[in-house]
Amino acid sequence: MTRTRKPVGRIAFVGAGPGDPGLLTRRALDALVEADHVVYDRGVPESLLTHVRAQARSDAEFSPAEGVPGDVAKVLISAARSGQNAVHLVAGDPFGHDSVVKEVQAVARTAAHFEVVPGVGQAEGVATYAGVPLPGVRTAADVEDVTTLDFDALAAAVGRGSLALAVDAGDLAAVRDGLLAAGIDGTTPVGVTGDGTGETQYTTTSTVDSFVAAALGFTGRVVLTVGAGVTDRDKLSWWENRPLYGWKVLVPRTKEQAGAMSARLRAYGAIPCEVPTIAVEPPRTPAQMERAVKGLVDGRYAWVIFTSVNAVRAVWEKFAEHGLDARHFGGVKIACIGEATADAVRAFGIQPELVPAGEQSSEGLLAEFSPHDEILDPVGRVLLPRADIATETLAAGLTERGWEVDDVTAYRTVRAAPPPAEIRDAIKSGGFDAVLFTSSSTVRNLVGIAGKPHARTVVAVIGPKTAETATEFGLRVDVQPPHASVPDLVEALAAYAVELREKLAAMPAKQRRGSKVQGPTALRFR
């Protein structure tokens, strides 16, 4: 009789880095995606865990590390013996923790297959995000027990270079006393960074004598930087000096569309909050779209004009229902109102013939759209699949240019459900530093489901039509990009924040305190 061998799982000790999900290595992410069971340390930030859970398998089990190193090792070994891939996810680098080293040693004494995936050390990584270089002879360590520190060696290291230590905030006083007892100069520069590499990272600079008082209110793990490198923060601090750092920005877009804008905002340091104001639904009767798709296949149209990503999606979904693909667009020219819409078309393997080079709006497209010529254009009909509430500007302009227009409802936009009460309160009370409107309907619907943004909230709009609607609702428009696109809108908001910061920096201290300018940029100067 042949006996089936039980599959054997693997164990991985994975370094999560200092906290920013973007610092996870590719190998670390691969190990987490393949994992059946992830045991995580409590020092791993919740934001990183959220990112990992989104990448992991839907049936993967997540549990906090409990007990002594031997207990954690038993959990990992048991999972591997049952055929599972088990991961212990730790902050920083695995070998930066004595407890994890003991776990690896315990696993190595068994027949289990294991690997150790390095991560960026917490102390060194946060020092870089804080803009503190560690030149010369440097020491960087993730400290679990400050009683094990050799303060004489640390003081000597500071004398020859710089020092970075990741410690618990409650241990700062013990570190200060140890450094002073080791003879370090009390005026030596010190930086203390909380929420290192996170959305709310904050660094305070002082000296060895005073850093405990300066870090009052810091909790959890902090990174202490000591030495000459701290004085370079004024020039090298980049994470906390991004244009929109700390700004809470409201993104009133559908869930499908908010991702790209939120990613751009995060790159500038903002904290986006996505609040869908519009839900997209199919048309009430599908007959129009059915005829339009048949017309596309039969050669009824010379052009298809897409005015939104939703319109592209609606047509492609209808194509899929009938087993059609991009080949059935053969002979039909495609125009797109803007680059985002054009990218959606390109994603299906088709290159649009026309995208406005100037203003990306109905007017901008009409300015570049050729009049109908009976000789050059034997087919004189245009398909315009749009939302049910679209304006008539484009259809009217095409008709004036001699084209026959099939203005078809491809999808309906309906008002989304109201956001939670705390979001509504934040909108009306000034809890958001900025709001980005990408269409007139986002203005109308946000006000309808959540109320009008507070006067101190910076209002940024994508184009002139959206600006008109915002003004109609009594909003002050602060930012409008020269071109109507999401990237340009975020760029314009970032430029506005830089301009705001420069104006505040030039103000005398008394004027700053009395300034009507709001937002985190203003608060930093108060």
Image (spheres, helix red, strand yellow):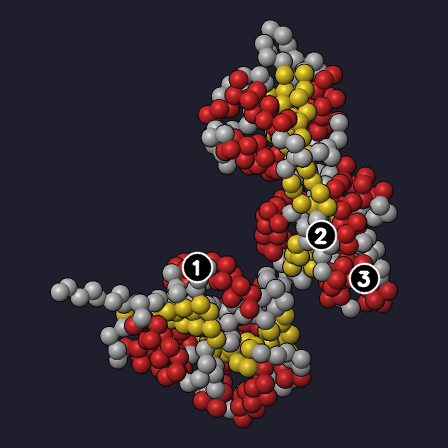
The residues tagged by marks 1 and 3 sit, at their Cα atoms, a distance apart of: 40 Å
Mark 1–mark 2 distance (CA, rounded to whole Å): 30 Å
Give coordinates of residue 427: x percent, y percent.
77, 58
Residue type (three-letter) at the residue carrying disc 2: Ala
Residue at (80% x, 46% y) in the render:
477
Label 2, label 3: how far apart the Cα atoms are:
20 Å
Residue 446 located left or right of residue 56:
right
Q: Quadrant of residue 270?
A: bottom right
Task: Indicate the secondary structure of the residue bearing disc 2.
Answer: loop
Residue that protrudes farthest toward the left in the picture = 1
Q: Is residue 147 above or below residue 388?
A: below
Could you tell me if residue 499 is visible in this image? no
Q: Classify mark 1: helix, strand or loop.
A: loop
Residue at horizontal 33 percent and vertical 75 percent from the top = 78
Please identify, in this view, whether the residue under mark 2 or under mark 3 is nearer the observer. Answer: 2
Question: Which is more toward the observer, 403 or 20?
Answer: 403
Residue 202 placement: quadrant: bottom right
> Is there CB contact under 8 Å for labels 2 and 3?
no
Which label belongs to residue 429? 3
**Can the viewer see residue 4?**
yes
For label 2, the crowd category at 10 Å Cα-Cα, with few meaning under 14, some 14 to 19 and many 20 or more, is some
* Element on which disc 3 rests: helix
Seen from the viewer's position, the closer of residues 301 and 416 is 416
Residue on which disc 2 sits: 417
Q: Amino acid at mark 3?
A: Ser
Label 3 environment density (alpha carbons within 10 Å; few <14, some 14–19, many ≥20): some
| Residue matched to label 1 | 57
Q: Earlier in the sequence, mark 1 or mark 2?
A: 1
